[in-house]
Image (cartoon, rainbow, N blue to C red):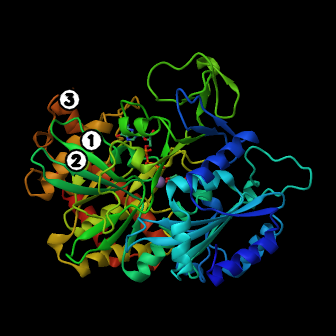
Amino acid sequence: MIKNEKLKQWVAELEAHMTPDRVHLCDGSQEEYERLLAMEVERGAAIELNPELRPGCYLFRSDPSDVARVENRTFIAAETEDEAGPTNNWIDPVELKQTMSELYRGCMKGRTMYIIPFCMGPLDSPHSRLGVEITDSAYVVTNMCIMTRVGTPVLEMINAGRPYVAALHSVGYPLEPGQEDLPWPCAPMEQKYISHFPETREIWSYGSGYGGNALLGKKCYALRIASVLGRDEGWLAEHMLILKLTSPEGEVFHICGAFPSACGKTNLAMIEPTLEGWTAETIGDDIAWIHLGEDGRLWAINPESGFFGVAPGTSYKSNYNAMKAVEYNTIFTNTALTDDGDIWWEGMGGPAPEHLLDWQGRDWTPDSGTKAAHPNARFTVRADQAPSIAPDWEAPQGVPIDAILVGGRRSDTIPLVYESLSWQHGIFMGAIMGSAITAAVISDQVGQVRRDPFAMLPFCGYHIGDYLRHWLQVAEQTSADKLPHLFSVNWFRQDEEGNFLWPGFGENSRVLKWIVERCRGLSGARKTAVGYVPGTEDIDLTGLDITADQLADLLTIDRDKWLAEVASIRHNFESYGPKLPAELWQELESLEQRLQAMA
Ligand code: GTP
Ligand code: SPV
Ligand code: MN
């Protein structure tokens, strides 16, 4: 029962304004989860997969217009435009609340209003934060139950007076009496709003039911609102995986990695090292909340409790742990459906079935010439279903970070790996990240490279210049020897025919080995204009079918390409305006000078 007066009042106001037919307070039980899914099956919104092949699994098909995050409908409604900064869409919060209040009026007619008390981070962690999402989507409830800790224990903490973030969501499709519902109700693009009010720590989302637009604990809270909390309170909310790596000697390392959407975080977080003797375990695959520990080191927790992972490209070969995780109790969205009631997607391994229903439920054969699964088809699965999950993944203090990787999807210029020259230079490496836009966002620019500082471009809840300053300031709070080492990685270099030059996936363990040995001062490198780059002899190629020449190609620093990169970065830095820290401008000048001095 809700005893928190503020929450009670909010719920009452929303009920009066959005006029749902029913209100349901979620207790987070298995029984509730199963009942909601059964209801979704009953009304034709979900398909129960063949229990002999994939027990406890369901397939949802979204509306074809509602398949990914909508960045141009995502708003940071800070009090002033300058606080949101040049990389965010800004609308005056008073005006935006007026517009959205009109949309929310009567929007839950004919529907159930669900109240989801949730916790980001382990229930017993001092770094965890609470939230309440109110939604009219049963799909959102079931996904939130996997992705976050939902239910009565959280409500009790809220009743006891702990603060929470208020997160409101509606699919934006009210039902008139007698009107039949759609399998995937949503509102047209121009009525979609994914809005954040950083000062009041509120989230208002309207019109979309998909992923980060609707599962408000994830990007909206754990990144956009949390990045503002971190700025104000001295910690960091980052778009990073967290990996635990153990060497053959038994030494444990923790690595965080900031890669943009659909650029390899889940895969690296679940890596099966191909190098003999090395083991990897998963702590988190998308978001890291990073705090300075009493020991002066940076510690990371995973605020989520599940994986909302990209399905296409996932196979027993490329990501064994994800495939094992999704063998049962998983929600699939926008994958294809086989004739025997199982799921399928491109890159699952083996030949394509002769016949499928595609992600829109249409007949599909290998000759159709279209993708059977949507490129942003996803699985939602509990984190502890991955065989690779680390036993201490819910440690309340998190894990101490040894290395931070930054990287994107770059077909040229950026080498396989290099290390920063200093902390400040490492923050510069994060600031200049570029990556090809992927299907994780609805955009007509998919495939084009854009700058994406620390993979936070779509997720930073305040001015990007202030954000980069916040990163630089971390170093002022501790000593250099306690800070993680910073590296840039790029698994996506291509040859002229568009083939990947590096095998990637499990073979990335070879790069990880070099990285953690650098952290211990053990492996070699040459100092180049861009940073410390391994020599071909420094990367362990045992058992890999790649020549030293091919590796040399992957590690080349091409002076002209890098000078073009500098010009593009300068253009981008200018767009950030005067709040961009001067130190980063200095790093850019130094990089250019070092490149010009290259033979
Ligand atoms: P979000 O959940 O959107 O944040 O994505 P992510 O960063 O977790 O990306 P994910 O690991 O799901 O990978 C996205 C796509 O890139 C998948 O299709 C993968 O198969 C592919 N991929 C991941 N790692 C590698 C790699 O090392 N090499 C190559 N060539 N592809 C990779
Ligand atoms: C991303 O786009 O980075 C994701 C998927 O992790 S979503 O939750 O839709 O944002
Ligand atoms: Mn992500």
How far across and down, in percent of the image, does residue 485 sit? 21, 62
- Left or right of 251 in this view: 385: right
The answer, for residue 226, to whether it is visible in the render is yes
Q: Is residue 270 above or below residue 476?
A: above
The residue pinned by badge 3 equals: 544
Ligand 1 falls in quadrant: top left
Query: Is the C-beta separation of discs 1 and 2 under 8 Å?
Result: yes
Corner quadrant of residue 501: top left
> Label 1 to label 3, Cα distance in Å?
11 Å
Q: Is residue 224 above or below residue 550?
A: below
The residue pinned by badge 1 equals: 508
Q: Residues within 10 Å of mark 3 (few under 14, many from 20)?
A: few
> Label 1 to label 2, Cα distance in Å?
6 Å
For residue 512, the mark is 2
Q: Amino acid at mark 3?
A: Leu
Residue at the (47%, 72%) spot, across then down: 129
Residue nearest the viewer, comparing 333 with 564: 333
- Left or right of 46 in this view: 496: left
Query: Is the C-beta separation of discs 2 and 3 under 8 Å?
Result: no
